[in-house]
Structures are given as structure tokens and as C-alpha cells.
Amino acid sequence: TDMVTMSKFLALVVAVGFPVLCGAVDLSGEWVMNPSKSSYKPKLQPQGETYSIEHNDPSIKVRFRTVWPDGPSSGVFAYIADGKEISGTKKLDNGRQANVTESVQWDGAVLVVKRKIKFAELPAIVTVETERWSLSADNRVLTVVTETISESPEDKTLFKMVERPTVIYDRGR
């Protein structure tokens, strides 16, 4: 019976632990922002946000809808979690055009999205964002921690802003 118990234990470890160790976390599902558990600067917190994620590794498609005090915004993010950098001009959800360089990859069970943004109307300022997406052990909570650093590369004393909001999403249906 000890051998049977050990076999069951090893099967459980492989079934639960192996996907996490290999980074094969499935982010698919409906996710609803939990404002009371999320941290933003007061004027920057949306009134609500939902993500609908389709995850077929390495492809991740995120449909979002965010409700801001001045109205809603929505769109789609499409990621390929292969670590390769992709550059191009994008229209951001705030309507502004920017040159964006982005890479997405797994760090164990954490999805890491790195983004460098240069706005045409602010050529002296560069914004670097690093998002870390992780699931709770029970797969019911998605946590997205973003570090955003905006500064002037030529004169670091001119301007520097650092933000580190954490957004908590509860699994919807």
C-alpha cells in the first residue's frame, strides 16, 4: 500500500506540478478586474475591466474592455510567447500613435511582456513597460503586475516617472 500511495502522489505531482514548471499555464477564460484588490494611482484606475483570453500556446489573444471615467475603450492584444522582439507603429487604446517594440515569453509559470514605447509627440521620452502575468494555484485569480518607467534617455535628470500598479482579475464564467 505504501507503493500505491507513493504512485498516486507522484502522479499528482506530475499532473499538477509539471505544467507549472514547464510554463504551460493556460490563461484562457473570462477575467473580471477586482478593483478592491487592485492598486492604481487614484485618477488612473478604471471603473472596470474585463479580459477574454484565448490561449493556444504560444499564441495568446486578449480581448479587453475597459471602462474609464470618460468612457469605455476596447480592443485586442495578440501575443506570441516566443521571446522574439516585434517592432512597429501601433495605435494604442488611448488613440495615440506610438512606435512600439515588444517581446513576450514565459519565465517558468509567469508570462512576461516587455514593451518599449516612443510617442511621436514626445520624442524625448521613452516608456519601458514590463508586465508579469501569473495565475493563483487554484487558477481562479489572474494577477498582472506592471512596471512602467518613463524617462528621457538623453537627460535622465529631465524627467523620470515610475509606476507599479498591480491588477487582480477574478475568473468569470
Image (spheres, rainbow, N blue to C red):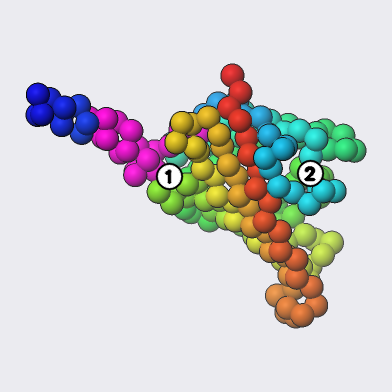
Name the quadrant of the N terminus: top left
Q: Report the side of 165 relative to 136 (left or right).
A: right
From the image, tell me which residue sits under label 2. Answer: 45
Q: Give the alpha-carbon distance from disc 1 to disc 2, as whole Å.
A: 27 Å
Q: Is residue 75 magenta?
A: no
Please name whichever residue, 21 or 28, is drawn nearer the observer in this view of the structure.
21
The residue furthest top is 173
| Magenta highlight range | 11-27
Name the residue at 74% across, 55% down.
98
**Res. 31 in view:** yes
Query: What secondary structure do most residues of the magenta stretch adopt?
Result: helix
Q: Residue furthest right?
A: 70
Q: Nearer the viewer, residue 53 or 36?
A: 36
110 or 13: nearer the viewer: 13
Does residue 117 show up? no
Question: Which image quarter is the C terminus in?
Answer: top right
Q: Position of residue 155 (x, y in %)?
A: 75, 80
Is residue 101 placed above or below 153 in the rendered structure? above
Q: Which mark is residue 109?
A: 1
| Marked residue nearer the N-terminal end (1 or 2) | 2
Front in this rendered view, residue 117 or 134: 134
Q: Residue at x 55, y 34 (%)?
A: 141
Residue 131: image location, x then y, percent: 59, 51
Provide residue 73's location: percent of width, then percent of height.
79, 35
- Are there few (<14), some (14-19), or many (20+) residues within 10 Å of tag 2? some
What secondary structure is found at the residue carrying circle 2? Answer: loop
Q: Amino acid at mark 1?
A: Ala
Image position of 59 with respect to 110: above or below: above
Amino acid type of the residue that numbered disc 2 sits on in the rendered structure = Gln
